[in-house]
Image (cartoon, helix red, strand yellow):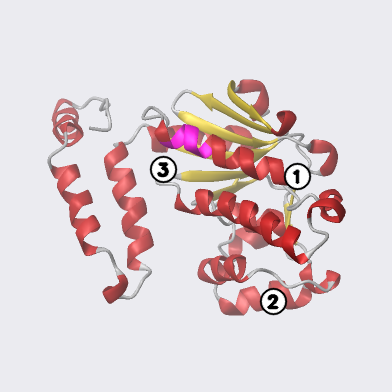
Amino acid sequence: MRIEDQMELAGSYAEGKLLAGRIGNVGIVLFNQPEKRNAVSLEMWEGVCAALDLFGAAEDIRVVVYAGSGGKAFTSGGDISQYAERRNSAEANSEYNRIAAKGREKMGALAKPSIACIDGFCLGGGLSIALLADLRVAAPDSMFGVPAARLGLCYSAEAMERLVTLIGPARARLMIYTARRINASEAFAMGLVDVIAGKDAASETLELAITIADNAPLSVAAAKFFIDQVQKQPKERDEARMLEHMSRCMDSSDYREGRSAFMEKRKPAFLGA
C-alpha cells in the first residue's frame, strides 16, 4: 500500500511537495517530490513547520508518521538544485540554515510520538531527518548511509550526536569513515532501524502507529518525555516536569478507564484526559 493513497489530506505546502494528511488518529507528514527522491527544499521545510504546528494543536492526532512518496526513497536530504540561488553567499546560507534548522527543531521537539516510514534510499541528509523520529520502520530493500566523506562534506554536529546516541561511537565511525551503504538488515542489527517490515513498510508503520495511538496519550507522552530526560545527567533533568507528568497520569480519567477496562476484560477507550 501507499500512505499517500490512504490518507485524508489536511494541508498542502510548497506547491504540493510537502503534504499533511491523517489516517484516523495518525498524522502524516509526506515528502512529496519523488522525481528528486523527495529532496527537501526550503519551502518544504517551512511546510514541515506548518504541518507539525497543525498536528501539535490537534488533540485527536496521537502519533505522527514521516514518509516519502513514490516508493524509491524516504528523502535524499536537501534539494541541491536550490543551492546556487538560495545558498550562494554567507548571508543566504545563514538564512537557509535558519529555516531548515527550525524544521528540524520542530521535528525533534514534537511532544507526540513519531515514526519514520522508510521505503528505499535513506542517505545523508535523509538519514539525519529519519533520526529525528522516535522510531524507524524500514522496507527490507531500503538502503542507508552517510556519503559525506565521498563528497568532501562534514555531517552536522546535530545529526552526528543523534547517530552516536542511537548506534554508539564505534558503529558511527564505521558508517562515517567508510561512507558505505548498508542494507536494512545491517541497519537493524546496529540499532539504526527498529522494525524491518515483513510486508510493505507503509502497512507495518501504520499498524505500529495505530497500536501506539490506541494507548493512553498521557502515558505515552510521559514515557517520551522521561526517555529523553533519563539520557541527561541527573542535574540536567527537569524533575518538576517529570513529576507533573506523573501527577497528570495518576489523576487522569484515562487511568480510571484503564483500571476498569482491565477488570472488565475489555479494550480501554482512552480520551487523553
Q: Is residue 245 above or below residue 187?
A: above
Which residue, given by chain and number where applicable, does mark 2 sit on? 174
The numbered mark, 1 or 3, whose residue comes first in the sequence reads 1
3D distance between C-alphas at marks 3 and 2: 32 Å
Residue at image position (84%, 69%) is 151
| Viewer-nearest residue: 202 or 83 | 83
**In the rendered structure, which segment of residues is drawn in magenta?**
52-56
Position of the N terminus by quadrant = top right
Q: CA distance from mark 1 to mark 2?
A: 23 Å
Q: Is residue 26 magenta?
A: no
The residue identified by callout 1 is: 73
Return the residue nearer the eye: 94 or 3: 94
Q: Give the residue at x 77% y 34%.
A: 70
Crowd tier of the residue under label 1, counting other residues whose Cα lies within 10 Å: few below 14, some 14–19, many 20 or above: many
Image coordinates of residue 63 in percent, x first then y, are 45, 37
Q: Residues within 10 Å of mark 2 (few under 14, many from 20)?
A: few
Whole-percent x and y of residue 99? 63, 51
Q: Callout 2, which amino acid?
A: Leu
**x 16%, y 31%: residue:** 253
